[in-house]
Image (cartoon, rainbow, N blue to C red):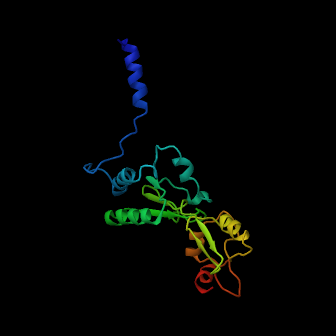
Amino acid sequence: MFAPTTLITTLLIAASFVKPRLTNEYDSAASPWELACTNLGAIFPASTFFRWSKGYSAMSDINWSATARAKPGCIIRPENTTQVQSIARLLSRRRVPFAIRSGGHNPAPGAANINDGVLIDLGLLNDVVYTPGSNTVTVGTGAKWTKVYTVLDRHGVTVVGGRILDVGVGGLLLGSKWFGTLDVGKTLNLFFTC
């Protein structure tokens, strides 16, 4: 038999491990992003981080510039393109505001982070595979240039890419920055012409 103080202490300790309920489908006061975060957490529990989750703060502050730091409602880190498709479909159908981050190097507010929306962090899509026979490289959008150069250096080849190693491949290519050469043009052009 438990003493009353022991029982109360046990209940308080147990309650401290219960995650707070974000929202549910029937909560009329819930915003679209809150509902989406709840759904993403149910579908991808190991890949969805809420504001109270361990690791959330570090992931929301990855952005290189303080001007791009924000407080997303949740952060989802897809592990493959199939998951990216599912996430995009869910967010599109619900008209949920979201941002996509490759490396988090864009200083523009809202470019690679979002307040009160869903942040899709593509950092796990970072494979870099060089195929010597065709002299091609397949690079995941979440890879950073340091990994690309390291993998290619082992084969004695390189590409025109980011000058700062911590920049994400996807962001640099989509931004079509002028980190190219006069011979081949902008970085993005190189990937389609060579």
Look at 57% across and 53% down and name the residue there: 61
Q: Position of residue 140 (x, y in %)?
A: 56, 68
Q: Residue at x 27, y 51 (%)?
A: 25
Q: Position of residue 164 (x, y in %)?
A: 69, 67
Looking at this view, is 145 or 134 the one in front? 134
- The picture places residue 169, in percent across and down from the top left corner, at 60, 69
Q: Quadrant of the N terminus?
A: top left
Residue drawn at 38 percent across, 63 percent down: 86
Q: Give the residue at x 49% y 57%.
A: 77
Query: Relative to residue 20, is residue 189 depicted above or below?
Result: below
Left or right of 147 in this view: 54: left
Please provide percent x and percent y for residue 110.
50, 63
Q: Is residue 137 above or below residue 37?
A: below
From the viewer's perspective, tell me whether residue 67 is left or right of residue 19.
Answer: right
Please give left or right for residue 115 compared with residue 192 in the image: left
Q: Quadrant of residue 194?
A: bottom right
Q: Give 67 or 170, whichever is nearer the viewer.
A: 170
Counting labels gives 0
Q: Nearer the viewer, residue 85 or 36?
A: 85
Q: Residue furthest front?
A: 133
Residue closer to the observer: 128 or 56 = 128
| Side of 148 where 175 appears, left or right | left
- Height in image: 159 above or below 4? below
